[in-house]
Amino acid sequence: MPSRSPRHPRSPRLALSAATALLLTVAASGCTSEGPGIVEGTPGAHGLRDPLFPKLGNGGYDVSHYALDLDYDPAAHHLKGTAEITARATQDLSAFNLDLSKLKVDSATVEGEKAAASQAGTELTLRPKRDLRKGETFTAVVRYSGDPQRIVNADTDEEGWLRSKDGKVSVAVGQPSGSMAWFPGNNHPSDKATYDIKVTVPDGQTAISNGELKSPPVTRSGRTTFAWQMREPMASYLAMLAVGKFKVWESKAPAKLAEDGVTAVRTVPVYAAAEESVDAASAQLRSEIPDLMDWCVTNFGPYPFDSIGSVVLRNADDVGYALESQGKPVYAGVKGGDNSLEEAQLHEIAHQWFGNSVSPKNWRDMWLSEGFATYAEWMWEEDQEGRTAQESFDEAFKYEPNWAFPPASPPDASRISDNPVYQRGAMVIHKIRQAVGDEPFLEIIQGWAATHRHGNASTDDFTAYVDAQTEADLSEVWEVWLHGDEKPATPNG
């Protein structure tokens, strides 16, 4: 790292005599970095050098908790926010970065003392008054404001703060980088944290976010505050916020199996919300949640979070895809009566195990999220519709776009959501099942979800874990189906 320039350049009017300067230099040599003017730390990296998104995330610290206090005015499309970030320094830090897009920082403190703040592009740099020691837990508070914006990512999908054309509904979604449109953070899946998200909106509007309501909404002076809490670690791209006129339904869903693997012994709250205009159309979607949860728990093991739900938006143009936001997947353009809704919702609920609880270490590991969720659809069709997973595999094998690249090696960020990540990823999972047998396969995927619960895992972690659980030779699965560049001659390899 380049050395830092002095904080207080010497003024000619205050120049010291050579003798006095020498005495001060000797005295200062015994000081620690707590003393004024002494700098021992270095700036944290701006970007974690992710193989697909090298500028996302930041080095030098690990966040444990975000406390967000937001005030949004839909009519003016204006957001005011305070982000209190609790983190641990992983090196001696003289400065560190947060990711923040197109919102202005009004002030910042670190450990209660004013910190210098500068912004360049999506990088917010905070320079504390004193260096932070490696291993030290610290709190940074950033106050910011502005008109939150959409972000167009490398594969042309829109994320960030998405506002309906009539301005009546806003939703913030984040895969892979959109969370920086509404709060400053370490915007990479490898740094997971717990969240408190408090949102104040005009009376009559609802603000929905991850986790559970800490207390009933409070209305004062024509504005209502909703306080949400996500107690389990969450990657920043899974944070969501929806503001508008929503109808909300609450129920219960099975979440955990007894030790005999048969009887459900715990339920979790279901918090299903939909724009008022799609109330009837979304009824099918929310009614399926308990059965889908029951099926997922049976196949994947105990549910990893304290609630489940959904947020349904009227217009598919506002969000052109479904997203597995932690605990509350987001769906758009729901019309009702469409059988594909069931599989779409199953896909997003399966992500709560694969992707949300077990999150990728970097964005090349995304196939572990999407391959598992896609294979969950194949398993569901096998159980419920009579179409075997082998038939789904055979169809995927024939589809040439699935062979554009190996699932764990998208050539660049624009290909992160291409077919091989989903379909060929699912084919890898099926090949494991073929090699080990049905019952050992379920034990492996349940064990994988349990072993890395609320953590991060890479492709190498996965292959090592599976190899350790079975005596079957999986070398061909890894070499040909996971990492191979060429399509095999037949579905059997």
Image (cartoon, rainbow, N blue to C red):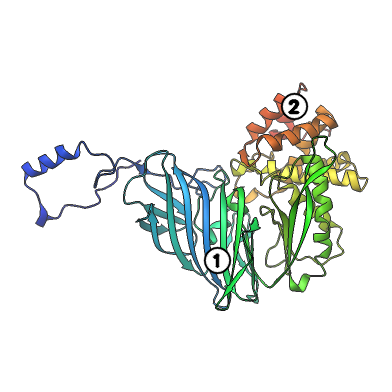
For marks 2 and 1, give the one nearer the viewer.
1
Q: Earlier in the sequence, mark 2 or mark 1?
A: 1
Answer left or right for 387 relative to 103: right
x 9%, y 49%: residue: 16
Q: Nearer the viewer, residue 37 or 167?
A: 37
- Going by the numbered disc 1, the residue's amino acid type is Gln
- Which quarter of the image is occupied by the N terminus? top left
Q: Which residue is mark 1?
A: 149
Kindly tell me whether residue 176 is visible in this rendering. Answer: no
- Which quarter of the image is occupied by the C terminus? top right
| Crowding near the residue tagged with mark 1, few <14, some 14–19, many ≥20 C-alpha atoms within 10 Å | many
Percent of width and height locating residue 472 = 78, 23
Answer left or right for 367 relative to 438: left
Percent of width and height locating residue 245 = 68, 73
Q: Quadrant of residue 141?
A: bottom left
x 73%, y 33%: residue: 447
Percent of width and height locating residue 167 = 63, 75
Kindly tell me whether residue 328 is visible in this rendering. Answer: yes
Res 50 label: none
Q: Nearer the viewer, residue 157 or 88?
A: 88
Q: Which residue is mark 2?
A: 476
Answer left or right for 230 relative to 330: left
- Going by the numbered disc 2, the residue's amino acid type is Glu
Task: Judge whether 461 appears above or below 248 on screen.
Answer: above
Q: Nearer the viewer, residue 179 or 159?
A: 179
